[in-house]
């Protein structure tokens, strides 16, 4: 019993010094640990903030790239800077990752591309983008191009590429002189692009004057040539039989065009209507220029034989050759149908001479990217 008490007495004598030692050592370590934790927290917060700014600045560069491409394709009107200038005003300020991002576009003298600078907080990125040359929309590089089906009659001949989104139907005596037959995969123009394209011809017609209401050319004598165009008709155009109409300029009709089967068009003025176009005989039409026959929303029907040098364009409708046709240029429509003995020859002149809206650079290549 005395031995136990002695042992307990000795143990209590050591406890207090040990507790004091532990308290002293804890005081030495706790303060540095707290300081380390505070420093680490601040470092992590700074790193997170820098990372957010870096990501935001990088997104701002992509925003600048997108804007350049969108402005070139869709004529947004902000205006790319000339040589040695900065885009003024700058691009609309944006917020990314809760960080305000300022993006500017500039172009140094003698350079073809553009510098895009994106600043987010204390981080900035400058990148140089070089634009690649643009390319024509593929549909204008074809002899025949249909968003859906192409149907050809007996002894038809096509020179040039044939594109179709649905079916290509033809008899065994069909002749494809040169070019490829392509099913699917070709970009079709958007409605806005078609409207803008038509507006260029509207302006040409307006230069010759405006006619309000329906316009009718009465029965002719079968031999007299009537010079017609340029003219903008806010209505429908009707041409009765026995007329020879020599187009001297573009006619643009907000309604439909109907030509009697015993009348014909010559000359080289373009023919554009918002609605359907029904033509009779075309004799050596379009031989003196890059002409277009276009229905913005409707169909184009050739009732009789047609000798045509033109781009024939019905993006929302059908182009139908009821009888023989000899076409040089190109035919682009939602659907194409031709009777027997049709000859269709692609002419690259139209692919090169007619500018379709939405021609964009083939892309871009980033040749410089620096974090500042």
Image: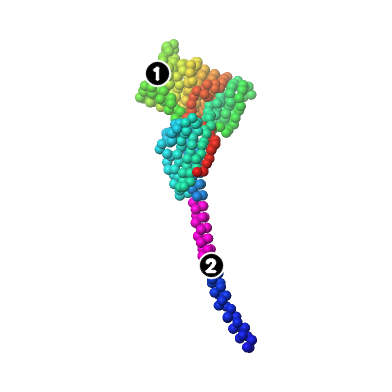
**Image coordinates for residue 348, horizontal then vertical, percent:** 54, 22
Mark 1 burial class by Cα count in 10 Å: few <14, some 14-19, many 20+ = some
Colouring scheme applied when the structure was drawn? rainbow
Q: Does 188 appear above or below 281?
A: below
- Give the residue at x 41% y 14%: 226
**Residue found 54% across the figure and 74% down from its top:** 20
Q: Is residue 127 magenta?
A: no
Residue underneath mark 1:
217
Range of residues picked out in magenta: 31-49
Q: Main secondary structure of the magenta part?
A: helix
Residue 232, image quadrant: top left
235 shown above or below 90: above
For residue 4, side relative to residue 328 (left or right): right
* For residue 70, above or below residue 226: below
For label 2, the crowd category at 10 Å Cα-Cα, with few meaning under 14, some 14 to 19 and many 20 or more, is few
Point 51% across, 49% down: residue: 51
Q: Secondary structure at mark 2?
A: helix
Foreground residue, 362 or 318? 362
Q: Which residue is mark 2?
A: 28
Q: Give residue 199's quadrant in the image.
A: top left
Q: Is residue 222 above or below residue 147?
A: above
């Amino acid at each position: 019993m005395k031995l136990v008490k002695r042992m307990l007495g000795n143990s209590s004598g050591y406890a207090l010094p040990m507790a004091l030692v532990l308290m002293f050592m804890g005081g030495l370590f706790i303060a540095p640990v707290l300081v380390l934790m505070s420093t680490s927290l601040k470092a992590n917060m700074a790193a997170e903030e820098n990372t957010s700014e870096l990501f935001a600045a990088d997104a701002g560069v992509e925003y600048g790239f997108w804007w350049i491409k969108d402005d070139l394709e869709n004529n947004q009107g902000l205006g790319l800077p000339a040589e040695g200038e900065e885009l003024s005003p700058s691009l609309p300020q944006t917020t990314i990752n809760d960080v305000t991002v300022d993006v500017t576009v500039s172009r140094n003298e003698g350079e073809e591309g553009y510098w895009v600078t994106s600043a987010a907080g204390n981080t900035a990125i400058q990148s140089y983008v070089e634009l690649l040359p643009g390319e024509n929309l593929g549909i204008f590089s074809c002899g025949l191009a249909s968003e859906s089906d192409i149907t050809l009659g007996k002894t038809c001949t096509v020179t040039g590429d044939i594109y179709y989104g649905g079916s290509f139907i033809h008899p065994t005596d069909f002749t494809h002189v040169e070019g490829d037959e392509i099913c699917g995969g070709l970009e079709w123009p958007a409605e806005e692009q078609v409207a803008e394209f038509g507006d260029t011809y509207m302006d040409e017609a307006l230069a010759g004057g405006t006619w309000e209401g329906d316009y009718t050319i009465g029965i002719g004598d079968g031999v007299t040539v009537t010079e017609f165009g340029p003219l903008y008709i806010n209505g429908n155009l009707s041409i009765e039989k026995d007329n020879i109409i020599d187009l001297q300029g573009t006619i643009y009709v907000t309604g439909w065009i109907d030509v009697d089967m015993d009348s014909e068009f010559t000359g080289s003025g373009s023919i554009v209507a918002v609605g359907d176009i029904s033509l009779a005989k075309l004799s050596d039409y379009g031989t003196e220029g890059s002409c277009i026959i276009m229905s913005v929303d409707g169909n184009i029907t050739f009732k009789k034989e047609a000798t045509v040098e033109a781009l024939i364009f019905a993006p929302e409708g059908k182009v139908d050759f009821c009888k023989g046709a000899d076409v040089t240029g190109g035919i682009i429509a939602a659907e194409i149908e031709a009777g027997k003995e049709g000859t269709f020859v692609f002419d690259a002149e139209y692919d090169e001479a007619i500018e379709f809206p939405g021609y964009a650079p083939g892309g871009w290549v980033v040749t410089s990217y620096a974090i500042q």
